[in-house]
Amino acid sequence: MHHINDPSGMPDSQPAAAAPGLAPPPRAPDGAAPVNSQKARRGLSRLWHATLYSMAGLRAGWQETAFRQEAMAAAILIPLAFCLGRNWTETALLAGSILLVMIVELLNTSIETAIDRIGPDWHDLSKRAKDMGSAAVLLSLLLAGGIWLAAICRALTSAS
């Protein structure tokens, strides 16, 4: 069966060939297909496939309204961070706080997606996991807002 996120398009039933001198990929307990063909990749091949998986994750994130809104805000705020920051530390804090919000949003979305895959039935643990992911996004937004507010107040007070 083909794995949805496998950019190679290789069916899971065909094990990846091990490079000379390297161990073959780990196999399922029944000796069937490899558990994860990515584990057998080495060097640039592994880096290339990891990059493709990351790009697929960003495309999947783009399907979420909140991530799109945060990405559009980042397109404005990250360049603004270079104007507002007085030195590289301030610039890194301003830009990094925006990137942190996007990272936490992607992690929250991945939690929600994994919970939704389990099933549509309501469960207290599923709710707790989703609520904690949402709380993490809220905390990252408050952190970013605080950093930006402090930088803007400093810029306004030093300008007058």
Image: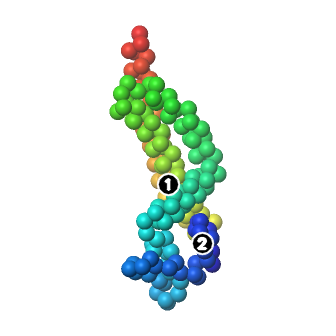
**4 sits to left or right of 88:** right
Q: Which mark identifies residue 107?
A: 1
Which residue corresponds to the image point at 51% horizontal and 45% vertical from the top-left? Answer: 102
User: Is residue 124 at all visible to an observer of this figure?
Assistant: no
Nearer to the camera, 106 or 44: 44
Which residue corresponds to the image point at 52% horizontal and 52% vertical from the top-left? Answer: 106
Q: Nearer the viewer, mark 1 or mark 2?
A: 2
Amino acid residing under circle 1: Leu
Crowding near the residue tagged with mark 1, few <14, some 14–19, many ≥20 C-alpha atoms within 10 Å: some
In the displayed structure, would residue 8 be above or below residue 71? Answer: below
Numbered disc total: 2
Q: Position of residue 160 (x, y in %)?
A: 41, 10
Q: Position of residue 26 (x, y in %)?
A: 44, 80
**11 sits to left or right of 134:** right
Colour option used = rainbow
**For numbered disc 2, what is the local secondary structure?**
loop
Q: Which residue is the site of mark 2?
A: 3
**For numbered disc 1, what is the local secondary structure?**
helix
Crowding near the residue tagged with mark 2, few <14, some 14–19, many ≥20 C-alpha atoms within 10 Å: few
In the displayed structure, would residue 16 be above or below residue 63? Answer: below
Which residue corresponds to the image point at 46% horizontal and 79% vertical from the top-left? Answer: 18
Amino acid residing under circle 2: His
